[in-house]
Image (cartoon, rainbow, N blue to C red):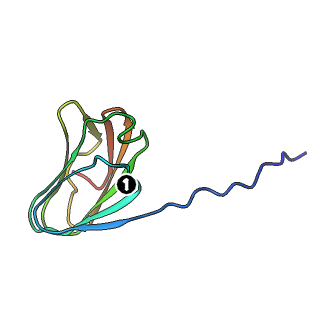
Amino acid sequence: MPINQPNIAPPALEIARDQYKGSHEAVFRSTSDQNSIISFTSSSAITVTLPVTTTEELNNGFQVRLDRDGTGTLTVVAESGAVVNSAAGLTARVRYSSINIVKTAVNLYKLTGDSA
């Protein structure tokens, strides 16, 4: 006998696409970046800093995708007191690489994707 389950649709994923041109340093401190795709089109090196946070500032599960669409390097670092873990490295490997950042706990982030 089959079990009836409510027909619940998954929430729609809202994606904002922002572009940063020129030399840029970015720090995520707002939930408004949640589920964003951010394209970096700079020919200069770019550093994205992951902040020390409380659960209220960026919820666990916060995620953002970073696209390296320019020729400048794109590197992710953590502020002192925070940690970013990655299997391969903290820099988007080549132009057109995408990396994903997920906050897994207070002051702990995981980087996945095409990194070196």
Return the x and y of residue 17 as percentages of the image width and height. 34, 67
Residue in the picture at 10% in, 68% down? 43
Spot the residue most to the top.
Answer: 81
Which quadrant would residue 3 be assigned to in this image? top right
Left or right: residue 57 compared with residue 49? right
Q: Where is residue 62 in the image (x, y as percent from the top left)?
A: 40, 46
What is the secondary structure assignment of the residue under circle 1? helix
Q: Nearer the viewer, residue 73 or 56?
A: 56
Residue 99 position in % (x across, y down): 30, 55
**At 86% across and 47% down in the image, what residue appears?**
2
Q: Indicate the quadrant where residue 21 lies.
A: bottom left
**Left or right, 91 with reference to 109:** left
Identified at 41% across, 56% down, the residue is 35
Taking depth in this image into account, of 48 and 85 the one nearest to the observer is 48
How many numbered marks have been drawn onto this rendered protein structure?
Answer: 1
Work out which quarter of the rendered image holds the N terminus and state it: top right
**Residue 95 in the image: x percent, y percent?**
20, 66
Q: Which residue is drawn at 22% across and 56% down?
A: 92
Q: Is residue 91 above or below residue 71?
A: above
Label 1 belongs to which residue? 32
Question: Relative to 110, is 19 on the left or the right?
Answer: left
State the residue in front, 69 or 89: 69
Q: In the image, is residue 84 above or below residue 100?
A: above
Query: Which residue type does callout 1 highlight?
Result: Ser
Identify the residue at the far right of this view. Answer: 1
- The 10 Å Cα crowd at callout 1, few under 14, some 14 to 19, many 20 or more, is few
